[in-house]
Every structure is written in C-alpha cells, then in structure tokens.
Amino acid sequence: MYYYRRVPRPPLDVFVASIWLFRDGPRPHSLERILPTGAAHQCINTAGTILAGVQSRHQIIDTSEQEYVAGVAFRAGRTTAFVRVPAYKTRDADIPLESLWGRQRTNDLREQLLERSDPDVQLDAIEAALEEMLQPAGLHPAVGSALTTFHRSPLVANIGAVTDAIGMSAKRFIERFKAQVGVSPKRYCRIRRFQQAVARAHRGRPVDWAQVALDCGYYDQSHFIHEFRAFSGLTPTAYQASRTPFQNHVKFLQSGEAAV
C-alpha cells in the first residue's frame, strides 16, 4: 500500500486542502463507511471520476473500486470555484465529473493518471486540470468569517454570535452558507464537532469518553454517543474496533467478515 499526498501550489491552495494518490491490494473487508468532514472531494478511480458533494451523513463504498484511486480534498465552501453549481445541490451526491467539466476534459485527466507512474507527475496532472477549471470565487465575507469561527470552536451556540457580529439576518446568512458550503451552519458545526471526537477515537489508545464529550462541547456522554452514531452509524467504541489507517474510513463488516 502507498498513500501519496501534497498541498497544491498557489493559488490552488486557497481552494484545495490536498491532492492525493492511493494504491492498495484487495482488502479483507468488501465495504467501508466514509465519514462526513464538512467539505467536498473529487475521486478518480477504476470505476470513473466523480465529484462527491459535502456529506451530511456517512456513506458506504465498495473497496474493490478503491485499489487505485486519486483524489482532491476541497476546502469547505470552495467547490464553486471549479463548478458553477450551488454547493447544496451536490450535497450527499456523487456526480459524474464529465457532467460538470465535460467528457473530453475528464477523460483526458483520467488517461493521464493511468498512463503515468511517477506520483509527482500524476499529481502535477491533477493540479493542471484544477488550474484550467479554476474561476476564483471568493467566499461571502459572512461565510468566510463563520468558517473561521466554526473551525476554531464548532459550537452551535456560536451561530447567533456570528450573525450578530456581521449584521446579517439569520435567514439570509443560512442561505448564503448553504449555497457555498452545502449544509446549514448548524449541521456544519455538528460535523466539525463530530470530527474532533473522531480524531480522539482514531488514536487507538484507551479513551475517557466522558472527557471527550466534555472537551468537544457535548451536553453529556449520552448526547455525544447519539451524535457520533448519527454521523457514523456506529458507537465510538465500535468505531475504534473497525477503524482503518485513515481516520474517516471505517470497515463496514458484513456477515462472515472478521475485524482484522
């Protein structure tokens, strides 16, 4: 197995968190859960090329299609710089990239990745395609300010403080936020708080779940477990038992499969 990742060069780094390559052999489990992160991504594999919009819940993927894959992890709210579609219209959807970028451009990128073997050259091809499609679209100031606040402290209670600070009505702010980020401010905060908890659970060491609940801003441990299950379909302890080397990929075990 190898995983090769880098942050793209400016100006792409404003819009894209990372570009990456992954190659692996057959895995003992046939399915995996992919956990929501609050941002969209682009995936290029043996089955095709898609834009996966921001997830509001976990989804299931077939690991047999992930043995040779490349991808783009967008920053929250930044997909509209590459596709002229409001982010909420791509939420929880896997959209063929050819319907957004055109068949020729999409096929050219895929062929370049398949024909080349050097990881840096392959990632250069992804960067070139992104640069060709880039039409810089700035975040609305209110959305940019909110994302900064929510990333630092993803508490739902901060939403009112943000709207007060920017002088925008709650309704208008939510509309703007959903158009650029894809989910409501409240759900985005819940996802980011969930991700803080996932990071703690992924370490593999014994965890004081009550302390995690407190540190991440949940009312209590019951609220924490309820929220964790809502986004992952698992309890925190079940997540630990089924985790993989990648924080947001979790084994989805079917009857007859072992948690190895």
Image (cartoon, rainbow, N blue to C red):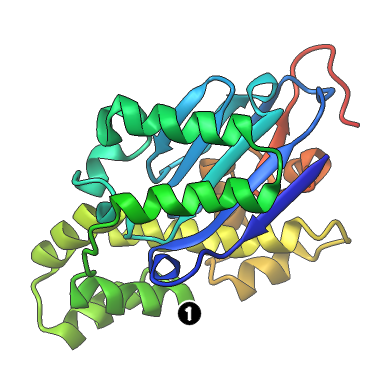
Viewer-proximal residue, 149 or 86?
86
Residue at x 79%, y 38% (from the top left corner): 242
Q: Quadrant of the C terminus?
A: top right
Please identify the residue farthest to the bottom as the structure is shown: 165
Quarter-of-image position of residue 34? top right
Q: Could you tell whether 217 is left or right of 249 in the image?
A: left
Q: Residue 183: in sight, yes or no?
A: no
Viewer-proximal residue, 210 or 169?
169
Q: Is residue 241 above or below residue 132?
A: above
- Name the residue that disc number 1 marks: 152
Residue at x 29%, y 36% (from the top left corner): 101
Q: Where is residue 190 drawn, in percent x and y? A: 44, 59
Q: Is residue 209 above or below residue 234?
A: below
Q: Is residue 113 above or below residue 27?
A: below
Residue at x 63%, y 66% (from the top left corner): 213
Quarter-of-image position of residue 235? top right
Viewer-proximal residue, 85 or 236?
85
Q: Where is residue 229 drawn, in percent x and y? A: 58, 43
Q: Amino acid at mark 1?
A: Arg
Instruction: Check disc 1: other Cα within 10 Å, few if <14, some if 14-19, many if 20+.
Output: few
Residue at x 84%, y 18% (from the top left corner): 257
Q: Residue 201: in sight, yes or no?
A: yes
- In the structure shown, which secondary structural element does the residue marked by tag 1 occupy? helix
